[in-house]
Amino acid sequence: MKACIIGAGVTGLSLLLLLTKAGIDPSDIVIIDPHFKCGDLGFRWSQVQSNTPWSKTVDTLNQILGLNLPTSPNTTKLSEIADLFTALTATIPAKRIRGFVTSVHRAENWTVNYHTDSNKSLNCKALFACQGSDQKILSHPAPSIPLECALDSRLSRYISPGDKVTVFGTMHSGTLAIQGLHDLSASITAVYRSETPFVWDRDGAYDGIKEEAATIADKVVAGKIPVRLLKASEMQGIDAKWVIYAMGFERRAIQGLDASYNGLTGALTQNAWGFGIAYPNAAPDGIHWDVSVAAFLNHMKAQLPTILQTLS
């Protein structure tokens, strides 16, 4: 086997599209994933509204892959993005293994150990880690509401009017959670780490909030959505029935892969790369990270010459 892709989310499927478009025989590619529901976008975040216009994703696909997909300036639910990538890759005859990768190690080639109904392994020339990430959490004593539930109608299963809820984080996910809590008449506290509670894309903040999140933040600042705002450095004890962690993500660990990587190339070690939300690419300013489907696509395309040389 030439290439093993760990994870069949949007990033893993994007890589599959790029490799096959570049001429790699699909029969030389294996993808390992526990669900094959287009990763977290399809499995966990499907009902969340994207903060990126549909056109940005589709225009990038059209440009890189020579497609002619219809575009739109509107945002969409993440399920629509997941459905698009699922449809684009459905007929590519790569080998698909439903299972969990437990560890990897490299000698002459890579050995990938995984579990399906039993422990198994395979060998490949190049390894691509696209395993995704889980939300960061703290050790607050109050029970937490899973972020994927806090961002859709499932929030109502947890919240009764007047419940005290603390949201850690005031970027895109945090503001969406604030709106949902307000709709359910919760008493909301939001904790932020930046200099101000919200930073907006319209003000030039790199990766600042926009679209629906920006509108919600405007309402909070105007007092239309009552929220107690606390800076993390000034926070002491918080009385809360529930907490919601919207502080970003940390990659799912795979034994045998070093946690460090090159943010410019995605290189992990020899003949191994990491892409997607687990290994976001460095932004042009050298400070931030570019986290979007379009950014991941362009980043992986830029690495193709080196990848193809390894697979030749």
Image (cartoon, rainbow, N blue to C red):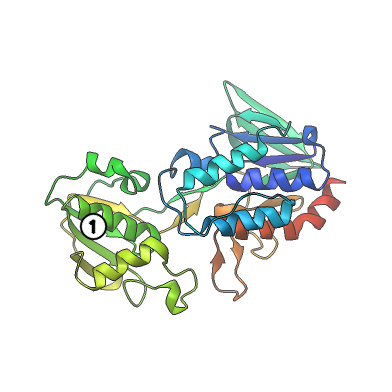
For the residue pair 184 and 168, the one nearer the viewer reads as: 184
With 207 as the anchor, is 113 left or right in this view? right
Q: Position of residue 185 (x, y in %)?
A: 15, 53
Q: Position of residue 111 (x, y in %)?
A: 72, 37
For the residue pair 21 and 170, the one nearer the viewer reads as: 21
With 10 as the anchor, is 140 left or right in this view? left
* Residue found at the far top of this picture: 117
Picture layout, residue 284 above or below residue 75:
below
User: The residue under label 1 is which amino acid type?
Assistant: Thr
Residue 220 showing in the rendered view: yes
Mark 1 highlights which residue? 166
* Few, some or many residues within 10 Å of mark 1 (<14, 14–19, 20+): many
Residue at (20, 59) in percent of width and height: 188
Q: How many marks?
A: 1
For the residue pair 307 and 180, the one nearer the viewer reads as: 180
Picture layout, residue 14 above or below residue 300:
above
Residue 235 showing in the rendered view: no
Q: Position of residue 2 (x, y in %)?
A: 80, 39
Q: Position of residue 159 (x, y in %)?
A: 19, 45
Q: Quadrant of the N terminus?
A: top right
Residue at (57, 20) in percent of width and height: 117
Residue at (82, 42) in percent of width and height: 24
Picture layout, residue 17 above or below residue 268:
above
Helix, strand or loop under label 1: strand
For the residue pair 150 and 210, the one nearer the viewer reads as: 210
With 262 as the anchor, is 2 left or right in this view? right
**Quadrant position of residue 196:** bottom left
* Residue found at the far left of this picture: 162
Residue at (54, 70) in percent of width and height: 288
